[in-house]
Amino acid sequence: MSEKTAGGTTLELRGGIDCPIQPIAGRVRHRGRSAPMRLAPILVVGGSGALARSFAQRCAARHLPCLLAGAEMVDADAVERMIRAQRPWAIVNAAGMTAADDAAHGDRAGMLAAAAARHGLPLLMLSSAAVLGDGDSRTESAPVAPADACGRRHAEAERRVLQAHPDALIVRTGDCFGADGDAGLLGRALAALRAGDAVALPSDLVLAPTYLPDLVDACLDLVADGEQGIWHLANAGGVPAIEVVAHAASLLGLSANRLRDPDDAGVARLLDSERGALLPPLTHALARFAAASQAAQAARRG
């Protein structure tokens, strides 16, 4: 899949950054004859969450203006004012991925979808493998059958989004991890190992681990390409959690001796795709994750 920012004319973006982009009809605006053209931002709702931060970081790396809005944005009038003032070319709903008790998630999802549809804007919402419950089929066309509160919350959000914006893009992903903080099960497990604590991981707990930078890059490509409907994105469709943590720990020089198998059973969060595998292999992702984590730790030490 080609990247939309490759080649083309050099335009000046917000903040004085020069970037080669292809002008997109209706999205690049002029301010007077001598003023440079400026690329409209992508509006990312998610505030300080790890996923929203990753969107901001990857947009900066790709020289794409990005406007972050707080996950608490549930007021339709505020969203309308922001769209009219900032004139984004697309909206990303990156909120509600972790808080199982986020009662506003469905309302916010539907409201953002309705606003995007009203303005003719592409909408991307991030969702979860939890919407598939314990079903055997794990592809995009599998029936939605959530088995827990998290799955039901995401399933309801998906329903509201597609009802308000039938052309929306919904990306389901697995257990996300990144070097920016202790995101996901992998991040929490590694933090515990660094602290010398034991980590209990059922041997039958299977995940679809997803490296946040890879996920966000693929999402940006899909939005730019005008993709619609449901996509499944993960670096691996199903890997035992204990193997993922042990591999990452070895790359970081941490001992995996404190990993143990509790008595309670794990829950599978598998993903498969009938539309295509867009993310790199998990081993590649873990190697880059380890390098980025070590660099971040070195920077924090000064």
Image: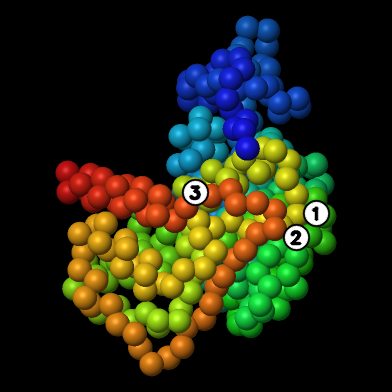
Question: Label 3 neighbourhood size at 10 Å, few (<14), some (14-19), many (20+)?
Answer: some
CA–CA distance in space, label 2 to label 1: 6 Å
Q: Is residue 75 visible?
A: no
Specify which label sits upstream in the sequence, 1 or 3: 1
Q: Residue at x 68, y 22 (%)?
A: 23
CA–CA distance in space, label 3 to label 2: 28 Å
Q: Residue at x 50, y 19 (%)?
A: 18
Residue closer to the observer: 259 or 213: 259
- Disc 2 + disc 1, Cβ < 8 Å: yes
**In the rendered image of this protein, does residue 149 appear above or below residue 62?**
below
Three-letter code for the amino acid on which mark 1 is drawn: His
- Judged by depth in the image, the label closer to the viewer, 1 or 3, is 3
Tell whether 283 sits left or right of 300. Answer: right
Q: Quadrant of residue 111?
A: bottom right
Question: Label 2 neighbourhood size at 10 Å, few (<14), some (14-19), many (20+)?
Answer: many
Three-letter code for the amino acid on which mark 3 is drawn: Pro
Figure disc tally: 3
- Quadrant where the N terminus sits is top right
Query: Which residue was labeled with disc 3?
Result: 280
Specify which label sits upstream in the sequence, 3 or 2: 2
Query: Which residue was labeled with disc 1?
Result: 165
- Disc 1 + disc 3, Cβ < 8 Å: no
Q: Residue at x 29, y 82 (%)?
A: 260
Q: Quadrant of residue 143?
A: bottom right
